[in-house]
Amino acid sequence: MMNTKIKTLLTLGTTVACLQSVQAQTQGNSLKSAYQEDFLIGTALGTEHILERNEKANQLIKKEFNAITPENIMKSQLIHPEVDRYNFSLSDKFVDYGLKNQMYIVGHTLVWHSQLPSFVHKISSADSLRIFMKEHIKTVMGRYAGKINSWDVVNEALNEDGTYRKSIFFNKLGDSYIKEAFELAAQVDPKAELYYNDYNIEQPAKRKGAIALIKKLQENGVKINGVGIQGHWSINSNNLKDIEDSILEFSQMGLKVAFTELDLTVLPNPWDLRGADVNQRFKEDPKMNPYKDSLPDSVQNALANRYSELFKLFLKHKDKISRITFWGVDDRHSWLNGFPIPNRTNYPLLFDRALEPKKAYQSLISLKESK
Ligand code: XIL
């Protein structure tokens, strides 16, 4: 006869096993697993995430995301502060974090007019600027060759009307800096996927410019794998048709389409500022910060609906989309609390300030459950 104590233990064992399996299922219920057949789900990591300072955030990142982009630490100002000095301590940790957690690692970004080290602004000759650009690509990309899966090689080279931005690179080197950067990147790490990344390129005029820029590379036999549409939008943006047209047009050119910096501001924007020019700044004003203490349900719902509409469209074209990356982990750390007006309380992401999932998160999970 089986001893009662053993029986109890066995029953307890079964209960524990059941609980563990329920737990495993809930753990399985994450963004990355819900969308695993569709596209990668990424997030942008800040220093606090790379250093694993907050265990709750760390668990959340590992559970929900299978792709990572460094929000700032690989920009030239930080990684290459002086002409012959690089600072790789955080970027090494970032790459190690991705490798140890089997994540798809994105390098952001090699050639960009913003967040440049101050010595670059002092460069006067075209030759010296070209040397800076090339050394930078060779050194940074070379260090992580075979480890970083994809690079935003050139970031934001266009104006809103689709013409070339008069950046320091364009002014000194002409538009051929783009070709030179991509050619070199293809040599330095032949396995890495190479992307052109920009905001507002879903909008018709700028999209036309992006198509022309990329066609020129393709016609010259230069390797480019994909285009990154940043996706800094608003809960009020009415741009689904533009987004769909862009997915179709870019993919017809043989490119992968990624949404690389997705976030949706819920705050007012009376200056009609569109896009994400990081150099645009406006003054503080209480009227512009209406949800300082909490977010009304109506806005929370609008955010969830808007994310849901976007993801319905992304799923419709999942065969053309490689990755959707959110620009940050949670609302507290979003850059949109400080841009384009400082010190606001914004709610653009899927996780709240306590790192709890918002209604928008649930809406993206249920989109897959109802399939
Ligand atoms: C932003 C970061 O989120 C901020 O922390 C920083 O102060 C400015 O840059 N387009 C890009 C990103 O490609 O690198 C920018 O990131 C947002 C716009």
Image (cartoon, rainbow, N blue to C red):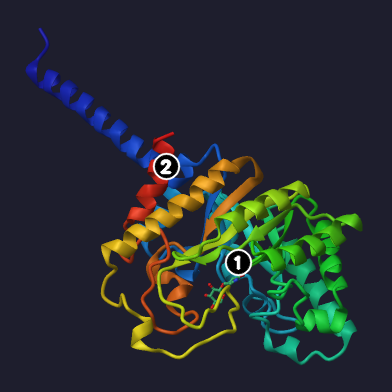
Say what amino acid the circle numbered 1 marks.
Ser
Q: Is residue 59 above or below residue 91?
A: above
Q: Amino acid at mark 2?
A: Leu
Which quarter of the rendered picture does the N terminus lie within?
Answer: top left
Which badge, 2 or 1, comes first in the chain's sequence?
1
Dividing the picture into quarters, in which one does residue 61 lie? bottom left
Residue 47 tag number: none
State the residue in front, 279 or 10: 279
321 shown above or below 14? below
Q: Is residue 170 visible?
A: yes
Whether residue 298 sits left or right of residue 79 in the image: it is: left
Between 262 and 25, the one lying in front of the other is 262
Disc 1 C-beta below 8 A from ligand 1: no
Q: Position of residue 333 (x, y in %)?
A: 42, 70
Residue 351 point in image, percent of width and height:
37, 59
Q: Quadrant of the C terminus?
A: top left
Label at residue 367: 2
Residue at position x 68%, y 55% in the image:
150
Residue nearer the viewer, 185 or 360: 360
When the figure is inspected, residue 187 is found, relative to residue 200, above or below; the finding is above
Relative image position of residue 286 (x, y in whole percent):
34, 87
Residue on which disc 1 sits = 91
Quarter of the rendered structure image containing ligand 1 = bottom right
Which of discs 2 and 1 lies nearer the camera? The answer is 2
Q: CA distance from mark 2 to mark 1?
A: 35 Å
